[in-house]
Image (cartoon, helix red, strand yellow):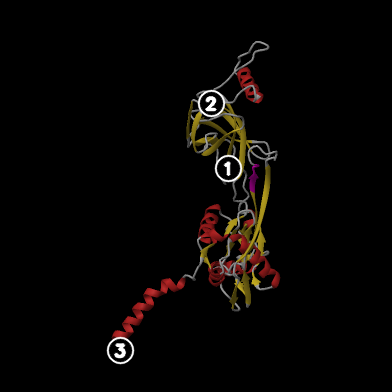
Amino acid sequence: MRLNLKLIALCTALLAPMMAVPAHAERIKDLASIGGVRQNQLSGYGIVVGLDGTGDQTTQTPFTVQSIMAMLQQKGISLPAGTQLQLKNVAAVMVTTSLPAFAQPGQTIDVTVSSMGNAKSLRGGTLLMTPLQGADGQVYAMAQGNVLVGGAGAQAGGASVQVNQLAVGRISAGATVERAVASNLGADNQVKLELNATDFSTASRVVEAINDKFGPGIATALDGRVIRVRVPSSSDQRVSFLGMLENMDVKPSEAAAKVILNARTGSVVMNRAVTLDACAISHGNLSVSIGSDTSVSQPPAGSRGATVVTQNPSVSIKKDAGKVIELNRGASLAEVVKAMNAIGATPQDLLAILQALKAAGSLRADLEII
């Protein structure tokens, strides 16, 4: 008896940590984001130089020549009037990046350099100093550096070989932040959690979990997506609080049953919540083939007959045996897929079958066609 009690106590101690975490629980960090903590897109127009004859054809991209002339004038170099530049080692590019949340001046970020003319390759080029602007027109970063292109190409005698894209490159730590974006995180001693998807059940569970851990009234659901959370006034305590908040485990509600149909590619994606009411599915193919054989009627030699071309049409009809599959009420996704495979339905057939099931009221799911 004492041995059994010890075994029971040992099993309980080992299973306690496993039972404490809900099944399929997810972190709040994965379910929601904090309002105001976001990236900001930056872009700028720049010039890449040092290309090995693979730059823009200046006769077709006049803006490249204009940019070079404007840059030379800024450097104190004046060109004679009527000068026609024929450049092969220069390319006009757009530089894009995302400014991380809370980025400070002096921090470096990666940038992507994309050709906007007809340059054949940016491989081996160097991006000249390029200001990167935000949506408000302010300069938030400056980019410059050697462009790294993850591809290769060669051509000779009219033949060419290319691997990956040569007109787009990347500069690691190629931009330096010059201006910080103002943040009002924690204003009025509160933050807002924004769920990735609107779900009243999940919002309610998040509020309940936060209040159970930190005390009643700390979290309040404003709607099915936004949750207001009271935070400490001290910045140090606020950061610590948000760190604990993001790592809390919450069991989200089951996703709504949905079927996504792509009519262009014929792909069908269903989640596990999709079920069917009792129904019968019939599938059969009827194919009609129409052909025409051409024959030539040649008259005997020496006769006055003419050569005539005749058409011999042929029509054939082929009907495959149809199959009827019966599904019981509440059939799961696995049973639906198994039934579709049993009747030999192709992805295009599945599109029509699912639409018919939805129209008949047998498909318990939202049907979305993209």
Magenta-drawn stretch, dominant element (helix, strand or loop): strand
Q: Residue 26 carries which label?
A: none
At x 70%, y 40%, the residue is 306
At x 67%, y 53%, the residue is 313
Q: Name the residue under label 1.
A: 98
Give the CA distance from mark 3 to mark 2.
85 Å
Q: In which quarter of the image is the N terminus?
A: bottom left
Which percent across, then down, holds residue 78? 63, 13
User: Mark 1 and mark 2 in contact (Cβ < 8 Å)?
Assistant: no
Which percent across, then down, holds residue 340? 57, 68
Residue 295 falls within the magenta-colored stretch: yes
Density class for disc 2 (Cα within 10 Å; few <14, some 14-19, many ≥20) is: many
Density class for disc 3 (Cα within 10 Å; few <14, some 14-19, many ≥20) is: few
Q: Name the residue under label 2.
A: 54
The earlier-in-sequence mark between 3 and 2 is 3
Residue stretch rendered in magenta on the structure: 294-299
Q: For the residue marked with disc 3, what is the amino acid?
A: Met
Q: Name the residue under label 3.
A: 1
Residue 311 falls within the magenta-colored stretch: no
Farthest-out residue, bottom: 1
Tally of numbered discs: 3
Q: In which quarter of the image is the C terminus?
A: bottom right
